[in-house]
Image (cartoon, grey):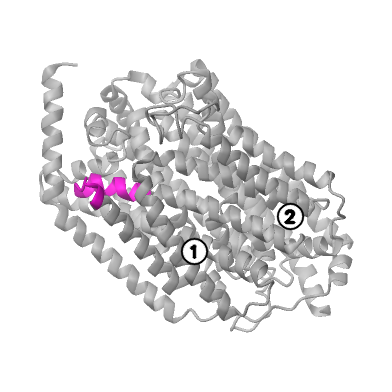
Amino acid sequence: MSAAHSSHAVIQLAASTSSTSEHRPLIITLFAVFVAATLGITVWAGRQTKSASDFYAGGRQFTAFQNGLAVSGDYMSAASFLGIAGAIALFGYDGFLYSIGFLVAWLVALLLVAEPLRNSGRYTMGDVLAYRMRQRPVRTAAGVSTIVVSIFYLLAQMAGAGVLVALLLGITSDAGKILIVALVGVLMILYVTIGGMKGTTWVQMVKAVLLIAGALLMTLMVLWKFDFNVSDLLGTAAEKSGHGSAFLEPGLKYGATDVSKLDFISLGIALVLGTAGLPHILIRFYTVPTAKAARKSVNWAIGIIGAFYLMTIALGFGAAALIGPEEIKAKNPAGNAAAPQLAEYLGGLGTTGGAVMLAVISAVAFATILAVVAGLTLASSSSFAHDIYANVIRKGKATEKEEMSAARWATVAIGVVSIGLGAMARDLNVAGLVALAFAVAASANLPTILYSLFWKRFTTQGALWSIYGGLASSVLLVLFSPVVSGKASSMFPDVDFAWFPLENPGLISIPLGFLLGWVGSVLSKEEPDKGKYAELEVKSLTGTGAH
Amino acid sequence: MATEAPPPPQSPEGGSPVQPTTEAFLEAQNSPEFAELRRSHRSFAFPLTVGFIAWYLLYVLLSSYADDFMSKIVFANFNVAFVFGLAQFATTFLIAWFYSRHATNKLDPQAAAIKSRLEADA
C-alpha cells in the first residue's frame, strides 16, 4: 500500500469526522422530529387502548398490509441495515449470505406457524405452547424462554444504539453512550406502557416506510452512478476491495478453516429456523382479525423484507465501490458505518446535500432501533403478565385490569433491566448477540411450537424438556464459545474457557431441542390430553372459536 | 371472496368468541371432512418445507465447500454464487405465492365449512 494512498485515507477520515460534528444539530433535529411524531402516535393509540385485547393485540383490527409493514418494521433491525450493508462492503459475497437466511426463514413462518398460531392463541406464544399441556409448568417455561430470547435481542439493539451514536454524533465518552442507552430505554418504556400493541404497531409501520424509502433512495442513487449497470457496480466493488474476483465469491469471511465453515453452517441453520420461534414476531399475528389476514401479512412481509435485502446488495457493494474498504474500516472496523458513509457520499461530500443525506439516514437508523426495541419489550412484558403473572402466580384469577397493570409494571422493570445491561454491554459484539437470539429461539421455541400443533403424542414432559433443554444447551454453548472468551473479539478477551469451537450453537442445540421434545414425550408416563389436542388441532386449522 | 372465513362472531368490545364443547371438537377432528382438510394442508406444506430447507442447505453447503463451482462466471461479472443467491430470493417469493394460492383455493373453503358447522351447533 503506497504512502500516498494511506495519507489520502487519513485526510478523508479527518474530513468526514469534522463533517459529522458540524452536522450534529441536523441529525439531532431529525431524530427529535421522529421521536416527537412517534410519541404523538403513541399517546393517540393509548387513548384507544382500553381492553387487554387492545393492549396485547392492538384490538386485532389491523389490516394484512398494515401488519405486513409492522412485521417488517419489527424484523429489520439495525443489524439488517447497518450490519449487512457493512458486511457486504467489507467481505463482499459473504455479507450477502446473511440476507438469504433471514429471508428464507419466513417460509417456515408462512407454511407452518403463522395461521395455526393466529387461530389457536390469544396474546402470547405461551398460549399455544401451553394449550394442550399442564398450564403452570409449560406457561412458566414459555415465559422464561420468551424473556430470555427477547433480552438477548434487546441487548444487541441497545449495544447497537451506543455504537451508532458514537459513529454518527461523534459521542465517544462512556457517559454519553450510557446516556443514549438510557434515552432509548425510557422511550421504549413510554411507547409500550402508553401505546401498548397499537402504539408499537404504528411506530413499526412508520419505521418500515422510512427504512424502505431511505434504502430505495440510496439504491437508486448508487445505480445511477453506474448507469444502472449492476455488473459494472460489482466489478468496481471487486476492484476497489483489493480482493479482486474473490470479493464476489463465498469464503472471504467464513471460508478460512474447517471450523469457520462449520460455524457458517451452524449460523445458516439458526437463521432459517429461528425466525418462526421469535416471540416478538409471533405476537404480531394476533393483531389481525383472521388467519387469512395473518397469511397475507406474512406475504407482504416477505415482499417488503425481500425487496429490502435485495437493496442491501446495492448498498453494500456500492459502499465498497464508491468509498472503499479502508475508509469504511477507519470509521468502524466492523463496517457498521458503511451505510451512513455511503449516504453522505451520495449526497455530495462536504456539501449541504451530503449533510442532509447523512442526517436522514442516521435518523432512519435510530428509528429502526427504537421500533425493534419497542416490539421486544412488548413481547417480554406481555409474556410476563399473561403467562407468568396471570396464569401461574394468580392461577387464572386475575382480572383484565390487574393483568394489564402487571404488563405495564413489567415493561418498566424490563426497561430498567435493559438500560442496566445495555450500559454494561455497550462494547459487546452485536452480531453475536443477535445470532444467539435466533439460535435460542430455534432451539427452545420452534420444536415445541411444531410438536404442539402437529404431533398428537406430544406431552407436557416433552415440552418442558425441549424448552429448557434447548434454552440451556444454546446458552451454555455460547458461554463456552469464542463469543465469550479466548479471542481478541470476545466479551472477556483476557481469559479463555472456550472449549466449544463454534460461535453459533445452532448446529448442536437445535437438533437437541427437537430430540428432547421427542424423547421426553416417548418416555412420559402421562397420556396426552386427547380432548385438548382435538380443540387445538381443529381450532388451528379452521379458526373455530378463535379470539 | 365468498369463501373467505368470516371473522369470529364476537362483540366489538372483545368478548369471548363462541366456543364449541370438547366433545364437538373431538367429533369434528374425527370427521372425514377434517381428515381431508388436514391431508390437504400437510401433504402440501410438509413436503414443500422439506424441499425449501434442503434447497437452502444445498446453497449453504455449496457456499462453504464448492468454491470452484460457485466462482464460475455465468455472464459479465455475475458468477454462479450470485445467481444461486438471487435464485433463493426467487424461490422464496415463488413458494410464498404457490402456498397462498393453495390455501385460498383448497384450504380456506374446507376450513370455513367445518367452522360454520361447528359454530352453528355450539
Lateral position of residue A340 relative to residue A411, left or right? left
Which tag, 1 or 2, sits closer to the chain's start?
1
Q: What is the total number of numbered labels drawn onto the structure image? A: 2
Is B86 in the magenta? no
Residue depicted at x 40% and y 34%: A492
Camera-nearest residue between A43 and B46: A43
The amino acid at mark 2 is Leu
Residue depicted at x 34% and y 41%: A427
Q: Which residues are magenta?
A: A159-175
Task: Describe the element under mark 2 as helix, strand or loop.
Answer: helix
Dot 1 falls on which chain?
A: A
Residue depicted at x 77% and y 54%: A460
Question: Is residue A374 shown to the viewer in this render?
Answer: no
The quarter of the image holding the C terminus of chain A is bottom right
| Residue A107 position within the rendered picture, expressed as x and y whole percent measured from the top left | 60, 47
In the picture, residue A416 is in which quadrant? bottom left
Question: Is residue A408 shown to the viewer in this render?
Answer: yes
Q: How many other residues sit within 10 Å of disc 2, few (<14), some (14-19) or many (≥20)?
A: many
User: Mark 1 = which residue?
Assistant: A378
Task: Describe the element under mark 1 as helix, strand or loop.
Answer: helix
Lateral position of residue A501 relative to residue A33, left or right? right
Camera-nearest residue between A364 and A396: A396
User: Mark 2 = which residue?
Assistant: A453
Question: On the same chain: label 1 and label 2?
Answer: yes
Q: How many other residues sit within 10 Å of disc 1, few (<14), some (14-19) or many (≥20)?
A: many
Give above or below for A279 relative to A218: below
Magenta span: helix, strand or loop, mainly? helix
The amino acid at mark 1 is Leu
| Residue A488 position within the rendered picture, expressed as x and y whole percent measured from the top left | 37, 27
Lateral position of residue A133 relative to residue A258, left or right? right
Dot 2 falls on which chain?
A: A
